[in-house]
Image: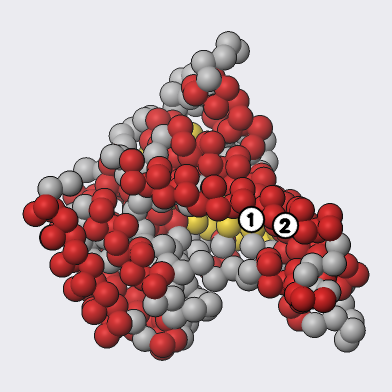
């Protein structure tokens, strides 16, 4: 980097720091809600104001072109923005599948008309997006999907279902992989299309999980309509477009997304939790096994964070390719290890399900542990990611 570039970046940092201090409301700092675009959820005043201000600045999607609602920031400027947001504890102004999954996909594969129509809406959080990939008989073998889209003039008529639809109850739109030509080989007769969920032909049913929550749903399409103009990437070209979207998804789960704005990490400090329940004299953690396990997790987590930063800095495309699989597998392992250790450090207080003898935070730990079991499945199962690593990174034979 030249001296001129260094000075320019320094000036950008100073201006960014000042703007964030003056414009980030107190209620958008620290732990709290982060919008994902759903029009069915009313935002708190400071959250809504923060989203509006950042969208006007182009910083909800800072690396996108200005004409589509971004700020056209260079990678170094993007990193500075993230650092300065973290410095004041600013939360992300917007997250979700709009800016993180389908937005970058439209930016890469969409026509000029589709980009002009959809990208500014993604950037402003105007609509909560769901993902229509998995079906009851098409999970890891996604190419076996059967949701049928038939020609209906200016529209496609959709019949079939999707399952494991995250946030289905609150979604406004869903991007779906659909079967547009059943006579072609299964990988070739698929298209990706955008569908309005607020229509009579779309029905959503929650799936209750062992943790007690229902973040996933079954989504039924019964003569639902989708505009032909909203088919992304070309007719029967959905398999390649859908695979690229999965790279964007895995980038998010791996913490190396370079599209949206990431804010402060508000996760509870496991060191503080462990000291609270395990502290002996001189703040020393009593159980040596817990001490060793905590130290190993802290070292692994720090190495993982540094790797994330390096991947973001080195990535020239809008999503890393093979690094996403490596980081997804490692991140899933660390997430499950953290949940395990959190419970172990709390002893019996980490095993409660209900009752006045447990605090709300303690009860949440049990549910978090149960939910963490799925992290190695959603967003790309660890087994499939390891196959990708074996074949495409290590060059091992089938």
Residue 114 in the image, given as x and y percentages of width and height: 24, 50
Q: Which quarter of the image is occupied by the C terminus?
A: top right
- Residues tagged 1 and 2 counted as in contact (Cβ below 8 A): yes
**SS type, badge 1:** helix
Report the residue at 53% width, 77% height from top: 31
Q: Is residue 203 left or right of residue 125?
A: right
> Furthest residue to the top?
397
Residue count near mark 1 (Cα–Cα under 10 Å), binned few <14, some 14–19, many ≥20: some
Q: Is residue 2 left or right of residue 70?
A: left
> Furthest residue to the front?
282
Residue 298 - label: 1
Q: Nearer the viewer, residue 288 or 92?
A: 288
Residue count near mark 2 (Cα–Cα under 10 Å), binned few <14, some 14–19, many ≥20: many
Count the marks. Answer: 2
Q: Is residue 119 left or right of residue 171?
A: left
Residue 313 in the image, given as x and y percentages of width and height: 33, 46
- Let me know if residue 39 appears in the view: no
Image: 375 above or below 342: above
Quadrant assignment, res 16: bottom left
Residue position marked by numbered label 2 in the rendering: 294
Residue 238 in the image, given as x and y percentages of width and height: 40, 34
């Amino acid at each position: 980097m030249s001296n001129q570039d260094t000075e320019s970046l320094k000036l950008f940092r100073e201006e960014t720091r000042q703007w964030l201090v003056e414009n980030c409301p107190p209620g958008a700092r620290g732990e709290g809600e982060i919008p994902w675009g759903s029009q069915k959820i009313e935002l708190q005043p400071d959250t809504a104001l923060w989203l509006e201000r950042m969208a006007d600045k182009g910083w909800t999607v800072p690396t996108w072109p200005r004409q589509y609602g971004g700020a056209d920031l260079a990678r170094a400027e993007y990193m500075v923005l993230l650092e300065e947001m973290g410095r004041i504890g600013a939360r992300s102004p917007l997250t979700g599948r709009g800016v993180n999954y389908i937005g970058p996909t439209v930016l890469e594969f969409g026509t000029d008309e589709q980009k002009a129509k959809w990208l500014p809406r993604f950037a402003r959080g105007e609509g909560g997006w769901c993902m229509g990939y998995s079906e009851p008989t098409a999970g890891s073998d996604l190419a076996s999907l059967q949701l049928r889209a038939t020609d209906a003039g200016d529209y496609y008529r959709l019949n079939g279902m999707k399952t494991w639809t995250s946030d289905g109850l609150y979604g406004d739109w869903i991007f779906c992989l659909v079967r547009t030509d059943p006579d072609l080989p299964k990988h070739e007769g698929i298209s990706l299309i955008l569908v309005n969920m607020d229509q009579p032909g779309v029905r959503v049913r929650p799936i209750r999980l062992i943790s007690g929550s229902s973040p996933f749903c079954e989504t039924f399409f019964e003569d639902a309509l989708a505009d032909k103009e909203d088919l992304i990437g070309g007719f029967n070209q959905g398999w390649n477009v859908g695979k690229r979207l999965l790279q964007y998804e895995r980038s998010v789960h791996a913490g190396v997304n370079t599209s949206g704005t990431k804010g402060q990490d508000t996760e509870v400090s496991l060191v503080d939790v462990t000291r609270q329940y395990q502290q002996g004299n001189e703040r020393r953690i009593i159980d040596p096994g817990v001490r060793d396990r905590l130290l190993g997790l802290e070292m692994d987590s720090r190495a993982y964070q540094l790797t994330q930063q390096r991947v973001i800095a080195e990535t020239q495309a809008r999503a890393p390719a093979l690094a996403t699989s490596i980081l997804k597998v490692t991140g899933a392992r660390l997430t499950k290890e953290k949940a395990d250790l959190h419970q172990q450090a709390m002893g019996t207080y980490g095993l409660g399900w209900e009752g006045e003898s447990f605090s709300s935070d303690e009860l949440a730990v049990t549910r978090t542990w149960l939910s963490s079991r799925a992290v190695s499945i959603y967003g790309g199962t660890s087994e499939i990611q390891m196959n990708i690593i074996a074949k495409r990174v290590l060059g091992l034979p089938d």
